[in-house]
Image: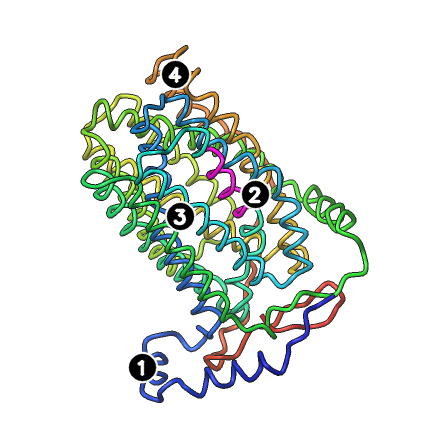
Amino acid sequence: MPYPVTRKEVCVTLRAKETVPPDVTSLRRRILPTWANRNFQLLAASAVITGFGSSGAMTAAAFAVLEAGGTGTDVGLVAAARTAPLVAFLLIGGAVADRLPRHRVMVAANLLNACSQAVFAVLVLSGQAQVWQMAVLSALGGTAQAFFSPASEGMILNSVQQAHASQAFAIYRLGVNGGNVAGAALGGALIAFSSPGVVLALDAGSFALAALLRMFLRVGSLLPSERSSGMWRDLRDGWREFVSRRWLWSIVVQFSVINAVTSAALAVYGPQVAASDLGGAGSWGVALAAFGLGNVLGGFLMVRWRPRRILLSGVLCVSAYALPAAALAVPVPVPLLVVAMLVAGCSSEVFGVLWMIALHQEIPQDMLSRISAYDWLGSVAIVPLGMAAAAPAAETLGMSGALWGCAVLTVLLTGALLLAPEIRRLERAENNPPTPAPPDQPAREVTSDGTVSST
């Protein structure tokens, strides 16, 4: 059942609009594109804030484990504890997001993340954190992400008209990645000169603020479609849609392995190599900031670049994911590691934008959350195994051997994917010429029952 828009909610929305000073509205319209409506602004702002807070949290968690006396195996287990519930609850999260108002699912997930990270920060700052406690709190964060990710997927594109979708997503990602760069640099500095707990507290605050912003999303424009079928039938329908497209499931299978080895390289091996050979948390924070800066550069590129064969261009960029693992395997000096992370970050952003355009172009909108859930599930399914196996692999092969294995697997899988003709041939659909929309005019979305709703 869709949630009705109450008179109280309508009045609150109208009062909020009436209280905006004319000079502020005029300034906002001069700075922002005409298609950047209220929902786009709120979604973008909240994503920038959480990106700023979370970009240093992964590194903070790793150093918190090490400072508590944990080993490399413990670092991998805590990281895997976040991913395991993500895998377990993703499909349910996708079905829930297609049945309930997506913004309410996102708010609830943000609040759970805020609470878990706040407790994590208190334990670390008090010096009482134990490995099992950090694993449990990481698991709560993974559970929240399992519901948040399918709900948020595609919302930014659906908040604007189709003609502006590509530019909107690229600009949105620019803001998010700018926040990631600043957050990673600040996080590394705070870990080096203060405590990982401070970074975790900053992350908790960012989730709380993002939840507050998302509460102001237009309720009437984000209502779910009414469904008569059950959740499990919805999941079966999503599965049929997923497996019917070979380009879709083959890329997801590729990333199930690449994400596992990349997560092991950056979340488990990276902090250890930085601590032993690169000068500690500060240098690793700079490297992560370079990855984020590469994301920003990739975003600028994608504002202008419109490749015709979107998947071919994107998949070719995936081979650059191998560069950070190879650089850590040597290990190269910090400046060269920064360059490797910069190139990998730029390539990652190019692929991410092109992948989202392909999904938005090829997948029915009423299926998008469920398809996104299968995408996420496949992409992270073996990440816990990769992280848990990282330390044993390093003990068997050596740190350098394990990192070289990560790099080689990435290149081989990328080459194999290019053999699929659907990936080489899928082209960008030509949109109609852009038509400026009023600043607060929402885009239209066709729901599963055939009606048209605003998003």
Q: Which residue is mark 4?
A: 394
Crowding at mark 1 (Cα within 10 Å: few <14, some 14-19, many 20+): few
> What whole-number distance in Å separates the C-alpha atoms at marks 4 and 3?
32 Å
Q: Which residue is mark 3?
A: 118
- Mark with earlier residue (4, 1): 1
Is residue 7 positioned above or below 144 on the image? Answer: below
> What whole-number distance in Å separates the C-alpha atoms at marks 2 and 3?
26 Å
| Residue 66 pos. (x, y %) | 32, 27
Identified by mark 4, the residue type is: Ala
SS for tag 4? helix
Labels 2 and 3 touching (C-beta < 8 A): no
Identified by mark 3, the residue type is: Ala
Question: Which quadrant of the structure image shows residue 422?
Answer: top right
Which residues fall within the magenta stretch?
A: 135-145
SS for tag 2? helix
| Residue 372 pos. (x, y %) | 60, 49
- Mark with earlier residue (4, 2): 2
- Residue 137 included in the magenta stretch of the image: yes
| Residue 337 pos. (x, y %) | 25, 33
- Quadrant (top left, top right, bottom left, bottom right) of the N terminus: bottom right
- Left-right relation of 394 to 9: left
Crowding at mark 4 (Cα within 10 Å: few <14, some 14-19, many 20+): some
- Left-right relation of 258 to 345: right
Labels 1 and 2 touching (C-beta < 8 A): no
- Mark with earlier residue (1, 2): 1
User: What secondary structure characterizes most of the magenta part?
Assistant: helix
Identified by mark 1, the residue type is: Leu
Identified by mark 2, the residue type is: Trp
